[in-house]
Amino acid sequence: MKIKFTVQDPCQIVRKSYGDPIADDLRFVVKSVVGEENFIDMQPNKSNNYCCGGGGGFLQSGFKEQRLEYGKLKDDQIKATGADYCIAGCHNCHAQIHELSEHYGGNYPVVHLWTLICLSLGVLGPNEREYLGDDLKEVNVFHPETAE
């Protein structure tokens, strides 16, 4: 697979709670799923990674312009990796980064960590593939009509 991935370190579990050890665990899982050669880390990363700007209730705060402005740093950081996808383990990060990609023309899909795990196991259902890019939509799809 030549598709490149980067991963967002969620504030709550990495910077506010368990630090680099849990960020290392996150990278272990990501690299196990996508392949180490397909992973590009953001700089800075782990406990020093930038907040996406969507947590702590900011997504629901009503200050959309300010939230997107704050998130520009994250969008620039993701673009600098050259990754095709950004993996998010947190729903707030997923929603914010997805909106940043659309707003700033990043053209990088954002995928939940659980989605990639299910995809790697061949258990991701067709209805759960809606937001995947065309390069991933058909990966490990089980077609009962063609199975022997």
Image (cartoon, rainbow, N blue to C red):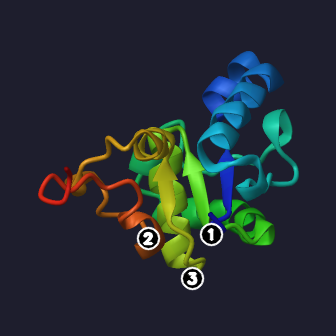
Q: Is residue 98 left or right of residue 69?
A: left
Q: Is residue 134 visible?
A: yes
> Judging from the image, what secondary structure is the residue with disc 2 in?
loop
Q: Which mark identifies residue 105? A: 3
Q: CA distance from mark 1 to mark 2?
A: 9 Å
Which of label 3 and label 2 is nearer to you? 2
> Which residue sits at x=47%, y=44%?
120
| Camera-side residue of 128 and 89 | 128
Quarter of the image holding residue 15? Answer: top right
Mark 1 and mark 2 residues within 8 Å of each other at the beta carbon: yes
Looking at this view, name the residue that lies furthest to the front: 148
> Which residue sits at x=41%, y=60%?
139
Q: CA distance from mark 3 to mark 2?
A: 15 Å
In the image, what residue type sits under mark 3?
Gly
Quarter of the image holding residue 19? Answer: top right
Looking at this view, name the residue that lies furthest to the bottom: 105
Looking at this view, name the residue that lies furthest to the left: 145
Q: Is residue 39 left or right of residue 146?
A: right
Mark 3 and mark 2 residues within 8 Å of each other at the beta carbon: no
Q: Which residue is mark 2?
A: 133
Residue 69: percent from the left, percent from the top?
A: 63, 67
Measured along the vertical axis of the image, is residue 18 above or below residue 44? above
Q: Which residue is mark 1?
A: 84
